[in-house]
């Protein structure tokens, strides 16, 4: 093949593309021109450069051709395809570069705007160089805030509050199927072990790990079990503390397609169903725990921790519904994955999104930044190179906000989540490190006879001609990004390394290569071909099967042979296997990209390598295997320092961070609670049906809410002074002593804010058999009145006045709602509740509503408790001032004059809803652009267009009409499954939130059938990506007449005479 002119010409075309192949590889190809090696070129460039499995298969078939002419023809076609790939890659990279430049300019502009808003009291540090002790990237394990190391302090903190919620994917407590698929990786083990470790901490009562219940033929039956108790790490002293519900549990919530295991990318439409199921579990368990340890009062979670994007999205909604602090761990992030896929040049942004639903994932991660108090990362690299890609996080702006908070200066409604570096932990108590080699172990004596070798040892050693040579161990899926092929080439091409050591590759479990995924099968095939190419038979082991329980024995075998563990991945977010190997006394060689940098800096037990440099890998391995003194020193360093990654250390740091959060939990007016407790239909009545369901961990903390938004995290950031430490300790010891500030500004003169007067009325809401929520977003008041009356008639309202209640959910103010009722000849008492201002206010008809002579201001009561649920991170007046400046900048030029397009609507604005009039909807930015602009400035809020884009509402990030329904369930026990939501064919920006969940939805055909203008769009993805229209809970009526509505109710199992 060498010297073919056509190959050289096409290589020149590929090289001329430039970005298609990096400079190092271009130089290599130029040097080799004239003695071209097709094997090396196509394997290296196609597999590692473009990751095109189909091209590799074509090359395999071409190389097998006996006819030189046919082989050359096929390879020529492949060159054309690679050339086209390179051109496509260059085009995509150019588009992405433009996008990145635009993002950078937007971020700089947002930073300037935020600085301008806060300029009146900027310190010198905020103007430029910050004080040297100001962290730019959050805290490491040894950060400024002292960890709560006192067990007494932890016990005092956890003594009265016992719940926590975790959310994750396909998991079980024992024999985890790690590597089964891309959804079941190391993060599953991390979450299970974290829950187990927390459940064993002194003072921690219970941990619940929530996941999906799956009863499918292609997965093990254990994933269909409703609950599973996690075996505690240590049972010493646990039974002395407790009762029947203590410990850590996996709780499986049924949602999504029944009897089917689907990948995480297809679960987005079912997230709200999971949230409702999880919320029901939390409510029921709070009652159970209250009876057991809470003195009859509900025991709520202290925090909700979401793992991965879909769980983070769920945790944000649960956190908002429960008014409980949220913590988030991303494990891997969507923007980083998107950038990596775009750099490969194989797919456009649209193609990537179609495959991975990546834009929905990114939006969920942005919501996590909006809602979380703490973001837990494993390494600084995750903060510096991954989270900084997001609109909602900016290192420089975070510095400024932290400096202001530290000084107690108002931040004008701006917030940043706390970035905290806490490396994953391990349990080392059960690990016994054995000294000596294989011969020493085999001898034994009469008193202590040698234990038989574990079966997995025999399975591995059968591959080797000389099994006593040091073992180089790699444990990873056969995935291109794990870079196993480069490891095999490094081993095969280094003769001294082959003579000194064996290579063991633990690449998951498989039955046959043909049954593996295309990508994994291709990588494994390449590895087998390399073994054959370098004649590595007798020197490389690649067993087909192993159990999770075998992994410690595999590490032990490698250590016994004085071997080395290697992780050669192109990038490794953390590298839990490195910790596991070090705990067994194995020196390590690891990629220099990602978490291993921090691990080796702490443990000092190995070497870092460039994963793209084959020579670097072989040199590092040879150095550790050949130099016995270096090997022994690395082994001892790892064993000496490994306790820094233990689960107890991790949990102490983790719990101290949670203790620094401002405590929040559901709180109601006492007078109403007393009245409510007399009811017989509370959610607690169904506890007998769930006696076998697990409970929750942990703690609920009360505390004073700071009136100034800027002081929200003041105690959190006073941590590097003795005074700050005292504040933290006082916060920990002050559990349940705070009182919610009950004063709220009620802006409407016609609203009476005394719920006590209607205490006898409100509990009837929960006694309804069904609740019909009318949430039609009609721009015409007359059309809305007509829909309401048809729903009344279809529900046979007069005959069903006891069993059916009605809630009106709109973007209208309460005064506009009152006018609507008067126009339609309806009374306020026709409804049990009114969700107003796009979900930022809830009202109830007052006791005087029956009196038609009473004034309008006496007909409604506002729910102040709901405001306490949604006020988290509400910017208030500072946000309003920023919005006014933005509104003034949106103008329409008319000749030489300029007319303001967006104007404040004072009459429709309220404490928790900033309303604006839009004169020309075509001139205003879309919702997604507005959200981006606000996130860049660290403003956390919910933006909605209503009334066909002529009105703009800005409300708290945790407020929405769908969240208001969850509040009604939480507050009054109105079961979500008994709610029926009536919507049109389209609606306001929050329309999609009304379609998902366990409640029933009836889409009224012909109502709001005109698609809203482009300004409404805030999704980068289709509605089908977030709504399961094939769900049995969603019915589309044939029309909006009474008979069709009744027919739709019948299909939902709600029959009315």
Image: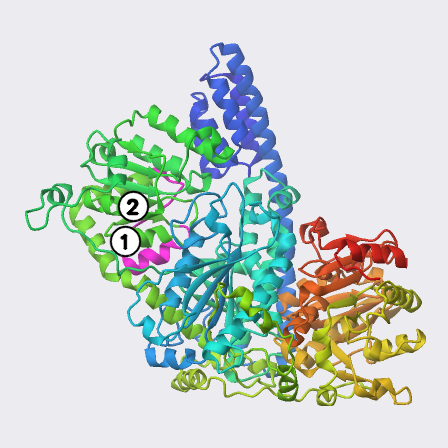
**Mark 2 touching mark 1, by CB under 8 A?**
yes
Residue drawn at (63%, 58%) of the image: 273
Which segment did they paint magenta? Answer: 593-614
941 or 891: which is nearer to us? Answer: 941
Asked where in the image residue 1006 lies, by quadrant, the reply is: bottom right
> x and y percent of residue 846 in the render?
79, 85
> x and y percent of residue 218 in the render?
51, 41
Instruction: Work out whether 925 lies above or below 746.
Output: above
Specify whether residue 608 is painted magenta: yes
Neighbour class for label 2 at 10 Å: few (<14), some, many (≥20)?
A: many
Specify whether residue 908 is painted magenta: no
Neighbour class for label 1 at 10 Å: few (<14), some, many (≥20)?
A: many
Asked where in the image residue 979 lies, by quadrant, the reply is: bottom right
Asked where in the image residue 885 lies, by quadrant, the reply is: bottom right
- Which residue is the site of mark 1? 582
* Marks 2/1: CA–CA distance: 9 Å
- Which residue is the site of mark 2? 565
The answer to whether residue 888 is visible is: yes
């Amino acid at each position: 093949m060498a010297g073919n002119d056509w190959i050289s010409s096409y290589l020149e075309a590929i090289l001329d593309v430039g970005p298609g192949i990096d400079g190092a590889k271009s130089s290599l190809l130029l040097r080799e021109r004239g003695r071209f090696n097709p094997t090396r070129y196509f394997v290296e460039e196609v597999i590692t450069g473009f990751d095109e499995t189909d091209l590799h298969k074509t090359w395999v078939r071409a190389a097998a051709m006996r006819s030189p002419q046919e082989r050359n023809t096929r390879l020529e076609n492949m060159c054309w395809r690679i050339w086209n790939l390179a051109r496509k890659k260059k085009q995509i990279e150019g588009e992405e570069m433009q996008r990145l430049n635009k993002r950078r300019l937007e971020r700089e502009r947002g930073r300037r705007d935020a600085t301008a808003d806060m300029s009146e009291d900027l310190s010198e540090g905020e103007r430029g160089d910050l004080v040297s002790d100001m962290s730019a990237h959050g805290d490491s394990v040894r950060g400024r805030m002292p960890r709560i190391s006192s067990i007494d302090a932890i016990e005092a903190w956890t003594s009265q509050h016992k719940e926590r919620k975790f959310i994750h994917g396909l998991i079980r407590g024992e024999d985890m199927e790690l590597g089964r698929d891309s959804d079941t990786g190391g993060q599953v083990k991390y979450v299970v072990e974290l829950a187990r470790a927390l459940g064993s901490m002194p003072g921690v009562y219970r941990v619940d790990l929530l996941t999906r219940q799956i009863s499918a033929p292609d997965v093990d039956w254990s994933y269909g079990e409703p609950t599973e108790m996690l075996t505690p790490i240590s049972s010493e002293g646990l039974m002395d503390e407790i009762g029947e519900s203590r410990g850590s549990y996996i709780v499986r919530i049924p949602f999504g397609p029944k009897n089917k295991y689907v990948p995480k990318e297809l679960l987005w439409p079912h997230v709200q169903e999971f949230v409702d199921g999880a919320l029901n579990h939390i409510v029921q368990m709070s009652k159970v725990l209250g009876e057991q340890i809470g003195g009859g009062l509900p025991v709520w979670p202290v925090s909700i921790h979401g793992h991965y994007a879909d769980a983070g999205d769920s945790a944000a909604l649960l956190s908002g519904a429960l008014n409980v602090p949220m913590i988030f761990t991303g494990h891997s992030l969507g923007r980083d994955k998107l950038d990596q896929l775009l750099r490969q040049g194989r797919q456009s942004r649209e193609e990537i999104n179609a495959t991975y639903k990546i834009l929905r994932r990114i939006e969920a991660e942005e919501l996590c930044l909006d809602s979380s108090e703490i973001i837990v990362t494993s390494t600084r690299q995750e903060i510096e190179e991954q989270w900084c890609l997001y609109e909602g996080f900016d290192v420089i702006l975070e510095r400024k906000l932290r400096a202001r908070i530290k000084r107690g200066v108002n931040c004008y409604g701006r917030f940043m989540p706390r970035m905290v570096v806490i490396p994953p932990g391990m349990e080392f108590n059960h690990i016994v490190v054995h000294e000596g080699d294989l011969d020493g172990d085999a001898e034994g004596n009469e008193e202590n006879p040698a234990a038989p070798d574990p079966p997995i040892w025999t399975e591995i050693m059968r591959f080797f001609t000389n099994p006593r040579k040091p073992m180089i161990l790699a444990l990873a899926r056969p995935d291109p990004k794990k870079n196993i092929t480069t490891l095999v080439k490094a081993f095969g091409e280094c003769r001294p390394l082959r003579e000194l050591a064996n290579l063991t590759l633990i690449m998951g479990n498989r039955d046959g290569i043909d049954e593996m995924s295309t990508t994994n099968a291709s990588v494994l095939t390449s590895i087998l071909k390399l073994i054959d190419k370098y004649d590595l038979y007798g020197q490389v082991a690649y067993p087909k099967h192993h159990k999770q329980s075998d992994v410690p024995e595999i590490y032990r075998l490698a250590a016994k042979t004085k071997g080395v563990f290697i992780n050669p991945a192109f990038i490794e977010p953390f590298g839990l296997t490195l910790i596991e190997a070090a705990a067994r006394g194995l020196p390590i060689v690891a990629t220099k990209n990602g978490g291993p940098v921090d691990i080796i800096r702490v443990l000092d037990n190995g070497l870092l390598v460039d994963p793209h440099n084959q020579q670097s890998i072989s040199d590092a391995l040879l150095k550790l295997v050949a130099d016995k003194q270096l090997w022994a020193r690395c082994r001892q360093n790892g064993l000496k320092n490994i306790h820094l990654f233990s689960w107890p250390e991790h949990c102490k740091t983790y719990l101290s961070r949670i203790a620094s959060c401002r405590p929040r939990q559901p709180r109601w007016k006492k007078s109403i609670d007393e009245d409510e407790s007399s009811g017989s239909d509370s959610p607690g009545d169904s506890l007998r049906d769930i006696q076998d369901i697990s409970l929750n961990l942990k703690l609920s903390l009360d505390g004073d809410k700071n009136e100034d938004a800027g002081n929200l995290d003041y105690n959190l950031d006073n941590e590097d002074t003795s005074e700050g430490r005292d504040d933290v300790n006082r916060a920990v010891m002050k559990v349940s002593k705070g009182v919610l500030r009950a004063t709220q500004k009620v802006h409407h003169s016609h609203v009476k804010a005394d719920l006590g007067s209607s205490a006898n009325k409100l509990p009837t809401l929960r006694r309804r058999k069904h609740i019909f929520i009318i949430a039609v977003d009609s721009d015409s008041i007359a059309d809305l009145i007509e829909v309401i009356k048809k729903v009344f008639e279809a529900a046979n309202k007069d005959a069903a006045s006891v069993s059916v209640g009605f809630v009106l959910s709109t973007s209208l103010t309460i005064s506009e709602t009152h006018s609507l009722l008067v126009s339609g000849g309806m009374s306020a008492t026709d409804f049990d509740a009114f969700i107003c201002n796009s979900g930022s206010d809830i009202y109830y008809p007052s006791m005087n509503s029956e009196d038609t002579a009473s004034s309008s201001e006496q007909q409604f009561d506002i729910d102040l408790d709901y405001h306490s649920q949604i006020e988290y991170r509400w910017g208030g007046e500072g946000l309003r001032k920023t919005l006014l400046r933005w509104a003034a900048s949106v103008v329409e030029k008319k000749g030489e004059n300029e007319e303001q397009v967006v104007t404040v609507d004072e009459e429709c604005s309220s404490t928790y809803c900033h309303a604006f009039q839009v004169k020309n909807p075509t001139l205003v930015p879309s919702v997604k652009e507005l959200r981006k602009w606000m996130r860049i400035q660290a403003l956390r809020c919910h933006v909605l267009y209503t009334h066909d884009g002529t009105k703009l509402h800005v409300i708290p990030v945790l407020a929405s009409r769908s969240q208001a329904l969850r509040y009604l369930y939480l507050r009054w026990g109105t079961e979500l499954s008994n709610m029926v939501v009536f919507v049109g064919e389209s609606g306001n920006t929050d329309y999609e939130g009304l379609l998902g969940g366990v409640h029933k939805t009836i889409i009224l055909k012909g109502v709001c059938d005109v698609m809203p203008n482009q300004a409404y769009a805030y999704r980068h993805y289709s509605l089908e990506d977030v709504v399961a229209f094939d769900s049995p809970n969603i019915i589309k009526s044939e029309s909006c007449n009474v008979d069709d509505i009744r027919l739709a109710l019948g299909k939902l199992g709600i029959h009315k005479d």
